[in-house]
Structure formats: structure tokens, C-alpha cells
Image (tube, coloured by chain):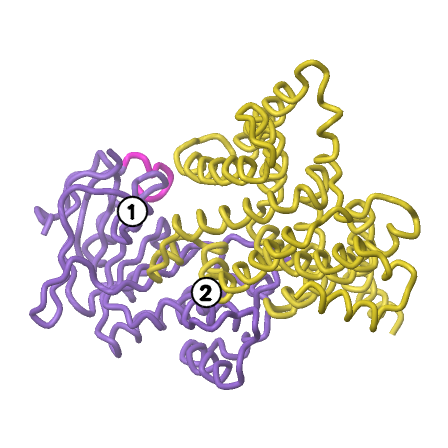
Amino acid sequence: MIDAWYKLVDMLLPFEWGQYLFMKNALLAVLVITPVYAMLGTMVVSNRMAFFTDVLGHSALAGIAIGVLCGIHDPTWPMIIMAVCLAVLINIFKGWTRASMDTVLGVFLAFMVALGITILSRQGGFVKYTKYLIGDILAVSPSEITWLVVVFFAVLSYWCVASNALILTSVNSSLARSRRIKVFLLETSFTILLAIVVMLSIRLVGVLIINSLLVLPAAASRNFARNTRSYTLWAVIFSVVSGVVGLVASYYWGTASGATIVLFCVGCYVISLVAGRALPKLIKVFC
Amino acid sequence: MILEGVNLHLHCGDVLAVVGPNGAGKTTLLRAILGEVPYQGNMVSLIGGVERRRPRIGYVPQKLQFDLDCPISVADLVVAATSKRPVWMGITRKALENVKKILGVFSADHLIRRRIGELSGGELQRVLLAIAMTAEPELLLLDEPSSGVDVQGLAIFYQLVRDLRKQHDISVILVTHDLSGISPYVDRIILLNRSIIAEGGPQEVLSNEKLIRAFGPSLWNVSALPSLSSGKT
């Protein structure tokens, strides 16, 4: 499968960067994972969960730390288990605490980051783990890409089955319940899916910017989308275009790919803000 | 314990207004009927001689949570609530016709392409009522329909509800803190403050001077009023 992709890149993209295997892998990874960020991001933004996904991303540090304590070489599984537990815990906590969600998340964020850094910094060893802070998409392996493809189809199927219910729940959970939607199950499954996607992305883009990749494409799309279809469609377009352009730019600039991709996402946001908000007003004033 | 000793009997086609001050437990009562909060005792629906635990419920919430730039159109909302086909894939022409039909009954079909953030309070309420009616409810729950709606919009809304219960023979429970203008549209009023304080026909309740006074400046004194009828029916 992956060989077919390499041949396709050689045929269609006869550029300098396209010759390298790591760029071919990274390009495929970007093409698979950016639409996933965009789709999940639309609901993250609609449900005001940006802080929540940030906490999820940062919990990776605690996940890695626990992996290290248990002597597990590959921290992916401890990270995923940690994040899924955290997601479920926050969801339950949300139900019975009287504190604002903001505060609850702040507490969890502090705990996760502090726990991670405390354990990982034993005997001054934190430097080893800075790679998880900024990620490295160029180091993605074909087996990791296979996982990303699995996640892509999982999210797509989930979106086909559950997105209507998620929309209804996002505007009013009692209304959703009155339509026989199991709200707790729905919200929990969504947060678990988010946790898995975020954790699989930590190695690629890092703890610090994973959240931007979820939030920015959807935020840019909201500047002019008038219905759910165009909201999703434009978020996917912004996400994929920023992903590919950012990856190629990072090759020529010699910069970290994840951060470069985010910069292009911000560019999309600014352009859509101007196009969606300012232009119609200017046209009204001058025409 | 938020509510105590609430005993309600509702006939098909009845419109019941549950009135009470803030914090009286009105919304809790609705949430209990919806099955969202636990309660002791039971709820029985007896329709056509068949006994069931819970009737089919249509629920019109007081408000929706969304940001003003929320990219959900009215058509999206209706399809999301009534269809399995994911909205993000787009709405087929056939589905759109169906949405128009659903909204047309409540003179809201012209709103179909608007974003929900662009609707007035009254318009949004009619859309939500249209959605609630697609569940073919036996019991319609209306949560504070007067909030965010002007007087004219509210009269239109109440008239629609009244027509509905005639056509569909459904029972309606309407929760409000605002007594003004509801009497032509309701059959019974219940005054709630932690438990049922008074119950009766709109004339009976609204002509009770003490009651009117209680709903004027000091809503909290309602609990001091004598029971209007013996009837916790």
C-alpha cells in the first residue's frame, strides 16, 4: 500500500522535497489526519471545548511519565489510557461539581502538567522528553500512518452516526434527551474519541500546538459559514491546505513542521475573518 | 428535596399552566417529567386504555445555547432532530421539502435558510415547537415560552399551541412565571412553590385577589396563601 503512495508522489510531485521518504510519509500523515482535526474541531468549537482539548493535550506529559514509571518504552498506550480516563473523569466531574467548567479544567491542567514534569524531571532528565512538546511529523513511520488511517475511518463513521445527535446536544441537552438521545453516552464517546486522536497526534505535532490544529480550522470556517455543511467543508479545506502548505514550507525553511502548519492555519483564520466580516461591511459602505 | 407532594392529573387536550416564582421548582418538575432528575412516586400515561410508564413527549426548551456566529441553519436544526442522515453531508432537496412542510404549519418556512443566531425569540420558539411536534407527542412541554418573546409573538405562539391541542388531542404543560395573557389559552393553572399551592381554572385563579397580589411585588409570599381547591387531584 505504502509503496503505491511513494510511486504516486514520485509521479505527481516531482519536487526536491518529494524525493525524500520522510517527506512522503509526512505528507500522507498530514493528508489523513488534518481532515480528522477539522471535523472534530467543528464540534470542539461549537461546544466551547477548546480549553478541554488543551487539557487533554497536556495530559500527555502525565501519560508519558506514568509510562516511564512502569518501564514501558513506547508511551503511546499509557498516554491514550491516561487521556481517556481523564476525559471520562472530567465528564463525570462536570455533572456534579458546582464550580465552573473553566476552574475544573484549570485544576486538571495544573495537576496533569505538574505530575508529568515532576516525574520526568527526576535527575534532570526532562530534556529527553522535549520532543513531545513540539513533536516531529517527519519522523512518522508507516505503521503509525496505518493507525492514523484507522482513526480516520473511525472518526468518519462516528461522524456519520453521531454528528446529528451531537449538534442537538450542543444547543440543548434536555431537547436532545427528549429526542431519546443518550446524552452522557454521546458526550463521553465523543471525548474518548478526542482523547485518542489527540494522543496519537502528540508525537507528530507536540503537546504545545495540538490544540491549535483542532480549533483554528473550525474557527476560521465559522467566520463565514452559514450552515453545518459549509462549516465542515471549509474547516476541512483550511485544515488540509494549511497542513500541506505548512509541511512543504517547513522543509524549505528548516523549521518545526507542526508549528509552521499552525502559522498557516492562523493565516487562514485572518483571511477568513477579513473576507467573512470586514468585506461585506466594506461593500455595504462603498456600494 | 426540591419538590414535594406534586400530584397532577392531565386529560387529553388539556392545557395546564404551571406558574410560580423563580426557584419554585418549575423547571425541576419539567426535568422530572422528562426523566432527567430522579423522583419518588410514579408517572403513568393512559392512552387508549393502554398503560405506559411514559408518554411520548415533545419538549420546547426555554432557550438554546449557541454563539451568535453559530453556523447551524434552521434547516440543519430540524434535520438534525428528525433525521438520521448526517447534516454535515448536506441536506437533500427532498429533505428540504420535508423541512418546509414541518415548519410551514407554524408559519416558519421562510426561516429555513437562516442561521439560528439570526432568529428573533418568537421565530426560534416556533421553530422549536415545529421540531417538538415531529415527535408526534402525546404530551407537549413548554418551558417559559414568554422569555425573550414580545407580546404579539407570544400571543401567536399561544394561539398555535391552542390550535395544536385541538387538532392533535395532545396534553400541554406550560411552565411560566408570567401570568399575563395566558388565561384565554389555558384550561387550568397550577401555582407551584416547592409543592402545589393552588389549583383551578384560569378565572378562578386569576380572579383571586390575593393571588394576583402575590404575583405582583412579592412572589415569595405565595406559599402563605391558602389552598384554592382541596384538589391535589
Chain B as rendered: colour: purple
Chain in yellow (letter): A
Question: Residue A172 location, x and y as percent?
Answer: 45, 54
Q: Residue A38 shows which numbered tag?
A: none
Q: Residue A161 shows which numbered tag?
A: 2
Q: Is residue A103 above or below residue B90?
A: above
Question: Residue B109 location, x and y as percent?
Answer: 50, 79
Residue under numbered circle 1: B212
Residue at point 49% right, 46% down? A192
Distance, label 2 to label 1, CA atoms, is 51 Å
Q: Amino acid at mark 1?
A: Ile
Tell me whether marks 2 and 1 sit on the same chain.
Answer: no
- Look at the numbered disc 1 and give the secondary structure of its residue: helix
Looking at the figure, which quarter contains the C terminus of chain A? bottom right
Could you tell me what secondary structure mostly forms the magenta stretch?
helix
- Look at the numbered disc 2 and give the secondary structure of its residue: helix
The image quarter in which residue B174 lies: bottom left
Horizontally, is B2 left or right of A237 in the view? left
Which chain letter goes with mark 1?
B
The region drawn magenta spans B214-221
